[in-house]
Amino acid sequence: MNAQQKLPAEKKKIKLKHYINYLLILALLIPFSITGLAGNIKGSTSLLLTQIAYSMILAVSLNLVVGFLGELSLGHAGFMCVGAYLGGYFANQMHAVIGSKLVVLILSALVGGLMAALFGLLIGLPTLRLKGDYLAIVTLAFGEIVRTVFMNQEIFGGALGLDTQKYGKTLYIAALVFAIVTVFVAQNLMRSKHGRAIQAIRDNEIAARAMGVNITYYKLAVFVIAAFFAGIAGVIYAHNTTPVDYGFFSFNYSIEILVMVVLGGMGNITGSLLAATVLTFINVKLTTQLSGDLAALKFLLYALILILMVMWNNAPKLAGLRAKVNFRNLVLWIKQTVFRLTHKTPEGGEEPPTNAAWDKIPTKIEMDAVLSTDLKPDRSFEADKPQAPTKGDKQ
Amino acid sequence: MSEYMLETRELGISFGGLKAAQDVNLKIKKNALYGLIGPNGAGKTTVFNLLTGVYKPTTGTFYLDGENLTGKSAIEINKRGIARTFQNIRLFSNMSVIDNVLVGMGNQSHCNLFESIFRLPRYWKTEKELRAKARELLRVFGLDEERRTVASNLPYGKQRKLEIARALATNPKLLLLDEPAAGMNPQETAELMETICFVRDHFDMTILLIEHDMSLVSGICDELTVLNFGTTLATGPVAEVLSNPEVVKAYLGD
């Protein structure tokens, strides 16, 4: 190959999209840490932030399975349950040995995560080899079974739940740091050779296999990693709420996590983070502000949000609007607005920034229209008169 | 090392009582452009599926460059150097053009999960090398400009090209093209013929292709094998095969 002919090199610039996820979490972490460490944070705010943090961890990890790998898992709360009970139990034992609460938290998070990952491996090993919706069925069953099993163990407190040592008002700082770790792993994994292979499996399993992608290995790896982080979320939950209530890890909660993933967008980590924040916020506000039965309104709200989201994503009449409303155009709009505000007299000055290249790319709808009109398959055999070969095209 | 890049001996598979392919004997010389034709349902794609490890042959053996690959897994076969495209395009449609090619190059990076997650030096090194290679490959196919486009947004002809590029990215010795000209107009077909010949010369590739378009087959292939009802009907140089009365009969009937 002609090595002399240099290609224009990839631009080396810091891209916002690589850091936006960290910035989102830091936006919660930094301001509240300052007040929190000064001791002026309300108990309810600190609880809310912890809940947001473990929801983020759950949503991002489930997104790895559902959004990037394309397998449906309905038992994410089950893995969280494993983490909460086993991690919580481990922490109870450790408090006697180790004085530092932070060290206990980190150790128990590791133990809880690893135990959940082990369960993930056991569940995934037989089911991920199969095609179809077996994983959804098995994880659904797993989620229900595992919490009932824990409920019936005297060692874990039985129906009363496992008593854990509650952490103070600063737990959320550690929890948000765990969320950052989750995002770090998820994001770096997906932007590597392995992440590309995983997404290739989602897009076309047959082609991925033909390209030499080890399907079972990657499916299992993603599933185990997701279970690991769900376990960590469980440990955080165990240190936030006492006693650990087996009823919390119900099927409804698995669906709630799935709603976060769908709402934020399949395969979109930023979306998962935002959806986890917003839904948890709504959830907590509804439960604390409204009493009793009215709190069930949250399910109505979830349904409405989901329906609107699905309509927005699929309605053919909204295609034109959809093509225009996206993150890049938002950034462009902000750039242009800033430009207008900073350059009061545009006459003779520089042009405002545009995203011309982006506009040229046809949307999928437009492409489909082009394909269906202009391109008629030409598959006429010319075998009725076998021609003498003309080898003119070959040297 | 052998004289032939691909050699199959009595290769066959039967599903229950149905013999989808039997006694297929192909001898493909290095750097040859070999055609596999036959009426619908003749078993052409089945042969491809046997050669790429999608099916395991029930009879016979096949050798790539003298190495017996019979019964190996799809991943193993891919690693040893057989890559394919598909009759109906199977791109990774939600991924960008360059990512499609990079998936194909996955077997050339030995960066493990841990190194990738923690961005150790080897990650950056291999990632940089692969990206440069992928762009070089895309440039050869005139796709470098569109490397950030989502694959499903490419026009049809370019999707075909991308599929070939992706197959080449796995660094194969033998390239299998399953009906590359399906759904193309004559002008696009002519362009495709150029591309195929170019791939053969530029990458020093041995190519086996299935095709219905006789102008393409007679235009670029060196040798042909005609399949009918799973068995070999005729084999040899193009002109000879296409004037064979048996072949004409298979296509047109009595």
Image (cartoon, helix red, strand yellow):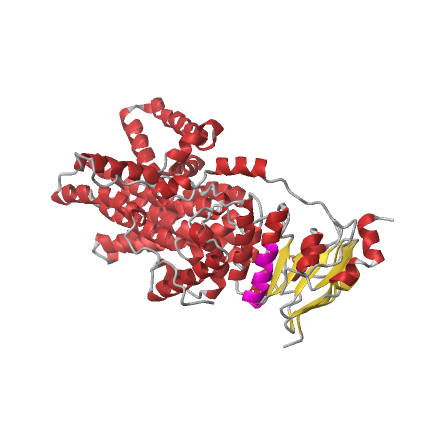
Q: Is the magenta stretch mostly helix, strand or loop?
A: helix
Magenta run includes residue B197: yes
Viewer-side residue, B204 vs B66: B204
Q: Residue at x 67, y 54 (%)?
A: B216
**Relative vertical location of residue B34 with respect to residue A284 in this rendering, above or below:** below
Relative placement, left or right, of A252 versus B80 is: left
Relative height, residue B155 to residue B34 (above, below): above
Q: In this rendered view, identify the residue nearer to me: B4 or A394.
A: A394
Count the numbered circles shown.
Answer: 0
Q: Position of residue B161 (x, y in %)?
A: 54, 53
Residue A203, x across and y down, in percent:
51, 47
In which image quadrant can residue A40 be found? Answer: top left
Left or right: residue B2 versus residue B16 is: left
Quick check: is B247 in the magenta stretch? no
- Segment tinted magenta in the rendering: B192-204
Q: Residue most toward the right?
A: B254
Residue A319, quarter of the rendered image: top left
